[in-house]
Amino acid sequence: MELTQVSPDAVTLWRLAGVLRSGFTTVMLVVPAGVALKVATELSAWVAVGIVLAAAALLVIQAIAWPGLTWRYLGYGVRDHDLLLQRGVLFRRRTSVPLNRIQHVDTHQGPLERFFGLSSLLVYTASTMSADAVIPGLDEQTAESLRDELARRGGDDGV
């Protein structure tokens, strides 16, 4: 079965979120490193600067490169009896959620998702209180129609 990919706009959203997280993390690394520089010898100061710069570079690379890979390997499909979700860059995971086990389906938007016109779809079954399947990066219309379709087809008749 050919899986459907989420919106390509999700890559831009994930990159922006990654850069914001990286910036925050870098600041959190620089402040302690600055304190260490003040009390350290010159040699250990250069080591501290090198560690902070290396960590910042890795964070930026991760924020820019990883979202494209995440998007490439993220897909979903609604089959006759289940919802299939595939994700994972290094470790691939395929999850099958039987339609008759679906209790309810939600859409979720944070501020950045709303700005990009994207939503996440959360699928809940009777087995847990947290979402059993999450499909991030769907455009709003797709998320809403998929939510309605899964809600209509999912669950049992209560008998």
Image: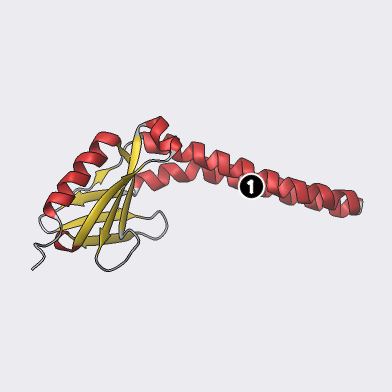
Res 72 visible: yes
Relative to the observer, which residue lies in front, 92 or 110? Answer: 110
Choose top left, top right, bottom left or bottom right for residue 81. Answer: bottom left
Q: Residue at x 85, y 55 (%)?
A: 44
Q: Quadrant of the C terminus?
A: bottom left
- Residue 9 is situated, as x and y percent measured from the top left of the image, at 37, 33
Would you say 48 lies left or right of 111 here?
right
Label 1 secondary element: helix
Q: Residue at x 40, y 37 (%)?
A: 113
Using a 10 Å C-alpha cutoff, classify the residue at mark 1 as few (fewer than 14 neighbours), some (14 to 19) or many (20 or more). some
Q: Above or below — where is 67 with respect to 103?
A: above
Position of residue 6 measured from the top left corner of the image (x, y, whole percent): 30, 41
Q: Report whether 72 appears left or right of 156.
A: right
Q: Provide residue 53's location: percent of width, then percent of height.
A: 71, 45
Task: Tell me which corner region of the image, top left, top right, bottom left or bottom right, holds residue 41.
Answer: bottom right
**Which residue is denoted by mark 1 in the rendering?**
25
Query: Horizontal placement of 20 versus 44: left or right?
Result: left
Residue 10 x %, y %: 38, 38
Q: Nearer the viewer, residue 69 or 122?
A: 122
In front here: 114 or 142? 114
